[in-house]
Amino acid sequence: MNTTQSTWRFAIVVTVLLLAGTGIATAHEAKCPYCELEVVQDTPEQDNETAIEYGKKRIEYRCVFCALSDAEKSYTGDLTVLAPSEIKGKPVLIVRTGGAWSAPDSTVFVGKKVKHRHCQTGYRAFTTKAAFERHVSENKAILKDAKPITLDEMVKIAKADIGKKK
Amino acid sequence: MKRVSLVCCLALGAAFPPPCFGQAEMHSRMAAVAHPESLPPLPNSLPNWLYGRKKNHIFYKRGPYNFDLYNIDRLARDMNAVAVGHAMAYEALVTGKADSLETQIFERIHWVLEHPPRLMPDEASISPTFGRTYGVLEEVFDWTHILHAQTMDVLASTDLSDSEKDQEIEALWRYYTESVPYAITPLPMSMVFLDGQPYSMAFRDKYPKVNGLFWGYHWLQGAVYDGLYVKSLRQQKMVYDVLGDRYHATELYRTDRPFMPMFAEVSPRFSLKFPHIANAFDNLHMLHDMVNDILASDWIPTAEKERQILRAIWLVSAEAHRGEEPGQSRGDDGMHDHRHMLGMPAMGMMKFATEEIMYMDKMGWMSMADCHHCSMPLPEGADAWKAPTVSAEGWTMRARCPLCARDMAAETRGRAIFHIPTEDAFKPLVVISDDQGNLTTDRPDAVFLEQEGGHETCQKWSSAFSSRAAFDAHVAARPEFKNARPVPFQEWADLRGKKPNTYVKPEGPEGNPYDKHDEDTDEDEVDE
């Protein structure tokens, strides 16, 4: 490709960015390292991106289940999982210190076994049980009669998934 | 989704053309029942050398650099083990031992990989039956393996300067193409065509573990070039500490690759400088896959296997494509489709790709002409060397600026290697990230210009310099940076840039073509 083509391509990129406005993603969007599906991006109303903070690294995941499974499989040492909650901009911080997991006391999870294409709905963290119930009622087709589970239970099912075919 | 795709099309400078040429044919072939009548015939009037039965023992071009790969002893030994593994597998395939490939043979190969030989073995002594049966094929393999070994020796030499290495690599290429007729074409080939034969995928489906080893070898044979290219011996050893660990821990044992590792996916800098060599290596690796698939296809009679192997050699031979040019395509069967990805003349047309974007393992849809972190165009032509690269999780990507490379690595699991050019093309900065993102370098006196702004101009406001003096000279010549201060390495290593304002997610014409999740039926969409 010659310089003229490159200049044109550059001009088109800039023009499209200016014209397209808010519809364009503004973040580098990676694939989930655990389930290898796209990471569902945050929307103005709801956070969806889960992340692991490990030292200076921040790795994005598709759901809290993927992050917890990969934390057990691929990382040693202390880390923090930032799980999107029902409150925009306020993730639930799930911390692993010395191998022990902890999260704020009122945290509950939905942990319904689903295909990974639905994992961002089937596995989520909530700051209250009421928020959990709202999520279940809004996603009845997938979650049906899901019951709230604790962090310990969530970690247990995440660990059990390691090594299984996705 | 559609809107983003359209934006991406426009951003990439063109609406999507139809999916890669020959794709529909490939799918229909793969769906067809395997039957000897479905095999393509041998072309008419093949050259006599293809039918040769005499042994032509050919050896290295003379040079003071020969065997300098042993300067990096661990790498040299790993390469020796690759040769043993290939030969053991081929011998098993032609001596009726294919049934033990995934068990006893795999274990034997694995042992060799864990205990690599000190010196390069003579493959003919490990696979004598294979050599007697497919003599010309072995000559073709050997000849390109010699080019491979000698180019690595040149890169590992401590006697040649970087510019002398470039010249010697071109001299080796001439030696390769002019000495004997066994050269592989330097043109980009359509992988859609080569991997769309009636027998394609047979070996991969039948022997996934051994195929994983083969593709692991090919990963190493490709990745090592950027690991060696324009680096001091000390830097090469730093890099191989990371690459070698990755090779032994992960790459050898992967059975989930959607396609064989392509040279430009793992060594984009070398591929841009020497696209003819990168293409020849990819085409050789594809020939390996085609031969594996033919030998693993029980439905092909033995005599027909020999004919199909001759045809496969012909398809990728330099002679079959003489006079053709990169970027051109003629005919309608795909054999002479030499188009390549925009921004990467060493990447032929891939399955499901357009010339603008392709699907890359672990990265998804991507453009080889744009930075994967900020989506802005990468430098090209004489400026191509100015793009940093970041290697992590098995891939190597070019980035537009040091900040893009650093932040891309910070968003990726595991250790990473950065190659960051400075003001001097031959004085790059090699940076290693540990798995927690802590950075170290062999040039701690390096300084950075980082005056973060929009990524439309990130190649200007983010740069690395080999010394404070070089930084001062750069800034003095550019009034827009008159207030910039030199950022020391450790401070730079702790920075984190904002999310690029220019990022546009590439979307392909067919979603994720290799996504196994899409094979689920509606009935099992939600598991109880």
Image (tube, rainbow, N blue to C red):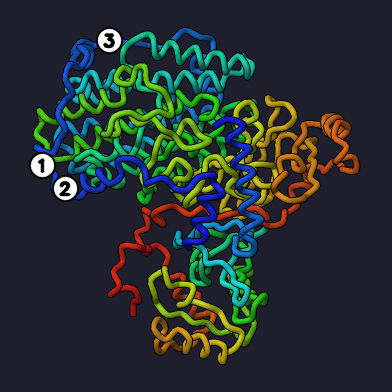
**Vertical side of B258 occupied by B331: above or below:** above
> What label sits on residue B56 in the rendered view?
3
> What label sits on residue B35 in the rendered view?
1
x and y percentages locating residue B126 in the rendered image? 27, 25
Q: Which chain's residue wears label 2? A: B
Q: Are marks 1 and 2 on the same chain?
A: yes
x and y percentages locating residue B462 in the rendered image? 75, 42
For the point 58% across and 48% down, the residue is B372
| Crowd class of label 1 (few under 14; some 14 to 19; many from 20; radius 10 Å) | few
- Mark 3 and 2 residues: CB-CB less than 8 Å, in contact? no
Q: Can you tell which of label 3 and label 2 is closer to the viewer?
A: 2
Q: Distance between the Cα atoms at labels 3 and 1?
A: 35 Å
Observer-nearest of B168 and A98 = B168
Q: Can you tell which of label 1 and label 2 is closer to the viewer?
A: 2
- Mark 1 and 2 residues: CB-CB less than 8 Å, in contact? yes
> Label 2, on which residue?
B32
